[in-house]
Amino acid sequence: MAQTNLVATYQRIADILRSTQRAAIEFENAPDKRKRLRTFSIQEVASLLAVPHREVTAFLKTIDEKGGSSRTRLTFDEINHLRRELFGRTGNLDLLPWRRPNLSEGLATIVFTNFKGGSAKTTSSVHFAQYLARAGYRVLLIDLDSQGSATAQFGLDPSNEVGIENSFAAWTAAREKGKTIDALSICQRTYWPSIDLVAAGAVLTQAEEALARRSASGQMEPVLYFDELSSFLTATGDIYDVVVVDTRPDVNMLMTIALHAATCLVVPTRATMTDLSSTGEFFAHLASYVGDFEESFGVRLPTQVARIMITAYDPTDRSQEALAGLIRERFGEAILPGEFLHSRIMGTAGFGKETLYEYEPTTDRAAYNRVLASANGVHQAIEAHIREAWGRGPTNEMQHAKAVRA
């Protein structure tokens, strides 16, 4: 009887919290109850595209029916339209940096992972996906964390709006049966026009179990279980430039298949002794796993670069400053340049479930600009690795940032 009551209590709490989350999402995104992306000012667009204001104003006039638009703001779709128009005129790849498969520019897969929860892993992956979209890339964000935090950040309720059909579990379920499905059917549009999402929720436990069964079977298969994410990405074709993967903060099957697909591994950590200790253990696990795999199968994992990202950094905290300086001295280029700053601005943006790239400050713009510049700095460093893999040089903005740091 007591056990039955306990089960009922657990279920009641779950139902209440789920309904509260759904109500919060709908309240924060009234009246259409879905997240939507704000519009951008002419000044923001000119800065984003590195073009004169007059180019943006002229574009607004051309898309107005009468050619005399008095609008001063653009939607993100309109920004992308302007990108394509300017690229058509100039051929400048910084404006439209889509990869060119015919020139052997392969799909870049950036995996954010660590043992430690609370390392701002999801915050980092979501912000990086949005940074890339703002820079003109076509992005697929894959949420492989059954908590669905990245999914919730994009306005979906992981408990009610994510099932087999729109999560990675659809792919693993089909593959376990020896079948194939359309990979793109799992990728859904988001309110960011350049970002598609493979959503996550508790249903991902089914994907974990399917991969575990295949791993335990010991049977040779046309595609081994650890290549499942790579196979899925191959099946998406050429419509994405960069894939960003958010993983669960522990060792699990889904994290393992992400390692086998990663061209770049980003390990977010705070500059605290506890976080750095956990991150050290994570790299020890990586060394052991990768070494054992290569020895057993004679195959190298595709990861070209692994970098530590210092997150939630408070430059006024002496201990964080000392630790950050120490690890930079010891590890050099293994640490991304700059830190993703902690700021009360993050709290202000987060209150409305907005990221820094969605938030539009009405006060204390200087503080917002500081934390935004810190985010852009670490993101540019990751983007530089993507461009290097494609055989491209740095953008003008990257060159300027590097000169400032020097």
Image (cartoon, grey):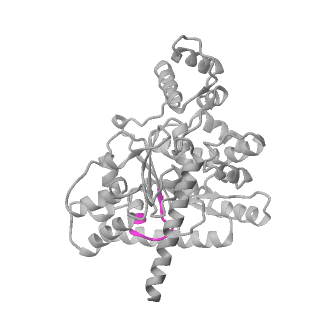
Which residue is outermost to the bottom?
1
Q: Give the range drawn in magenta.
A: 246-256
Quadrant occupied by the C terminus: top right
Question: Would residue 216 appear left or right of 60 to someone viewing this image?
Answer: left
Relative to 340, say whether 104 is above or below.
above
- Tally of marks: 0
Instruction: Identify which residue is drawn at 52% across, 27% down.
Output: 78
Position of the N terminus by quadrant:
bottom left
**Magenta run includes residue 343:** no
> Relative to the observer, which residue lies in front, 177 or 86?
177
Residue 362 seen: yes
Residue 194 relative to residue 229: left or right = right
Determine whether, in the image, residue 369 is placed left or right of residue 82.
Answer: right
Quadrant of the image occupied by residue 237: top left
Residue 267 seen anywhere in this rendered image of the structure: no
- At x 58%, y 72%, the residue is 278
**Residue under the image location 61 percent in, 53 percent down:** 336
Q: In this view, does 290 lie above or below 333?
A: below
**Relative depth, front residue between 114 and 178:** 178
Q: Quadrant of residue 118?
A: bottom right
Residue at left offset 54%, top offset 37%: 135
Residue 317: give x, y in percent of width and height. 78, 62
Give the x, y percent position of residue 159. 45, 61
Image location of residue 274, percent across then percent down: 65, 73
254 falls in the magenta region: yes
Q: Where is residue 152 in the image (x, y as percent from the top left)?
A: 51, 54
Question: Toward the viewer: 348 or 371?
Answer: 348
